[in-house]
Amino acid sequence: MKAIFNLFDFSQKVNYKTEVLAGLTVAMALIPEAVAFALIAGLSPLTGLYAAFMMGFITSIFGGRPGMISGATGAVAVVIVALAKTHGVEYIFATVILAGVIQMLAGVLRLGKFIRLVPHPVMFGFVNGLAVIIFMSQLVQFKAPDATGALHWMTGNQLYLMLGLVALTILIIWGLPKLTKAVPSSLAAILVVSAIVIGFNVDTKTVGDIASIKGGFPPFHIPSVPFTFETLFIIFPYAGIVAGVGLIESLLTLNLLDEITETRGNGNRECIAQGSANFLSGLFSGMGGCAMIGQSLINVSSGARARLSGIVASVMFLVFIMFGSSLIEKVPMAALTGVMIMVAIGTFEWASFKMIGRMPRHDVFVGILVAGVTILLHNLALAVLIGVVISALVFAWENAKRIRAKRYVDEAGIKHYEIYGPLFFGSVTAFNEKFDVPNDPGEIIVDFKESKVVDMSAIEAVNRLTERYKKAGKKLHLRHLSEDCKKLLKNAEDVIEVNIIEDPHYKVATDKISMG
């Protein structure tokens, strides 16, 4: 309830005019997207519209990122389309409810923090790929049905009119902020272009040409599916993918808006809000969804920074469905297409071109790869996962090459090996090659002051090294092990003689790095 009361807290310095106008802009931009994604999933348009309202309303109030917009999305649509074809809409509702439960559990278990593991090149690739997808998805608006209903590219005056109206929309969005910022430029563009089309009775594609958006309040409906383990086995794989894709896209969008607004969102709170919204979406005849980066950027670029804009957007969205469908269906698609094209241009990280030749080649490669997978497969979660895995492998490879050893024999005839760099699965081979067991003296000290035993592979490497010296009749000591290293080695004490020669409470160099 605190989030609701904060809406009216004047100490937050909420610009109510900006929030309301931004919300109206987003509400209009949501309609064609929700309808299109419902049709992609093989569902009725109202299923997407109801999901957009429920997702937007719940996450705007309780989400972890004020100003972020959620709704029915293509990422969810492409996951559930197969289930919709084989089992029908009732199983979709059950899947969305289960996905919501999984997402809420992720929030309760505080798994949202793992989004921090996404490297910056992956974020670049994600954003750039998404920008291209947003742009390409608008190209369908330049197609018109023929007598048989098949879509073909517009030609002649029809094409020129569409291009002209889109160009006018883009011009207003680009130019109006240079004159005044009293009204969001996207909203002004939609209103101006709509007034021209309606006032002069211009024959062009409108929202109503896609599908009717007339409906009522989302009806409460418990999915009509058998409550059996067989049903659970059918829907669980889809629910798991929906939950994962939804959280990845939402948390990446949250991170992007954090950078734009220079504020910090709450990932775990967003997980719970997304889960609650999907749970209720399934109970109120919706197809589910997640954060929408395009509409979120429209909202933020319009000046919205509080929760009020998202609430206004979702409430007005419902008002349009229930009472204003006849008017909204007259809005030209050219206006909404122009808005989304500008969103795509604003979303693209043009600075990423500067990375080429200046940043490590593997970072550039990862960014291009993630963008390519996003564009080709339209699967944001898979693209991000591939990028993270490759970045992790590159990181492991680079660190594996950093293991070094400084060797010397002291006055007592004891040979010292000072190890530099982390000892983990990637560096154990190079670590083993550093030691000259046959020719070493009878007593050896391995100094880990500048190193760290990281994982089980490292423990096994130390065990094998000890066995090699034991077979050679020589004594091995370990020195300057940090507390966490000793904890890892505890189970191997019967094999390794842990002999801390000096004060063990050293600040190991790699500890300092990990604390950063």
Image (cartoon, grey):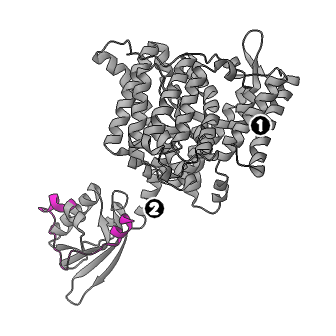
Residue 183 position within the rendered picture, expressed as x and y whole percent measured from the top left: 70, 43
Q: Which residue is mark 1?
A: 169
Tag in front: 2 or 1: 1
Q: In the structure shown, which secondary structural element does the residue marked by tag 1 occupy?
A: helix
In this picture, residue 373 sits left or right of residue 235: right
In this picture, residue 260 sits left or right of residue 329: left
Q: Quadrant of residue 16?
A: top right
In this picture, residue 401 sits left or right of residue 28: left
Residue 297 position within the rendered picture, expressed as x and y whole percent measured from the top left: 60, 43
Q: CA distance from mark 2 to mark 1?
A: 49 Å
Q: Quadrant of residue 514?
A: bottom left
Query: Which residue is at a point 24% across and 58% down the rendered structure image?
Result: 460
**Against 174, is 471 above or below?**
below
Q: In the image as oriented, which residue stretches furthest toward the left? A: 494
Q: In the structure shown, which secondary structural element does the residue marked by tag 2 occupy?
A: helix
Query: Which residue is at a point 47% across and 55% down the rendered structure image?
Result: 394
For marks 2 and 1, the one nearer the N-term is: 1
Q: Which residue is mark 2?
A: 398
Q: Name the amino acid, label 1.
A: Thr
Which range of residues does the magenta coloring cover? Answer: 488-516
Residue situated in front as seen by the camera: 78 or 43: 43
**Against 490, is 112 above or below?**
above
**In which quadrant will I find the C terminus?**
bottom left
Residue 52 in sight here: yes
In this picture, residue 38 sits left or right of residue 405: right
Q: Residues within 10 Å of mark 1 (few under 14, many from 20)?
A: many
